[in-house]
Amino acid sequence: MKKYQLEITEDQALVLFELFNRYDKTGSFHFEHPAEYLALQSLARQIDKTSSSVFEPNYAKLLQDARDCIAEGFDGLVPVNNLKNTPSH
């Protein structure tokens, strides 16, 4: 498995910590300040520059495999009330 290193500033870390902490407490993912969106977009831009998998013809399969790998063993421990489609395995 490839590993990537992403960089964020201290300000971005604080803003993202608050965003993720709020989600953890409320189960609701929403932006309360434009800085939250901008910090998250900064990470997304870095991922766009590093991962070539998004251009693979079997991207959907790669994404499903990645999701399954990351979530393995955490069934029932992750809040899923905000998911559009909860897969039934």
Image: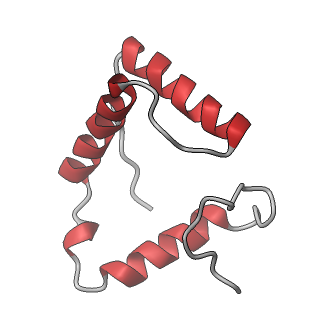
User: Quadrant of the image for the N terminus?
Assistant: bottom left
User: Quadrant of the image for the C terminus?
Assistant: bottom right
Q: In this view, does 79 lie above or below 33?
A: below
Residue 48 location, x and y as percent? 22, 52
Relative to 41, is 83 on the left or the right? right
Residue 60 location, x and y as percent? 37, 81
Residue 31 location, x and y as percent? 44, 34
Relative to 9, is 69 on the left or the right? right
Residue at (57% x, 34% y) in the render: 20
Coloring scheme used: secondary structure
Residue 43 location, x and y as percent? 32, 38
Count all numbered tags in the image, as a single digit: 0
Residue at (46% x, 28% y) in the render: 32
Q: In this view, does 71 lie above or below 36?
A: below
Q: Which of 27 and 20 is in front in this view?
A: 27
Residue at (36% x, 37% y) in the render: 40
Q: Nearer the viewer, residue 20 or 34?
A: 34
Residue at (53% x, 30% y) in the render: 19
Q: Is residue 23 above or below residue 57?
A: above
Residue 25 in which image quadrant:
top right
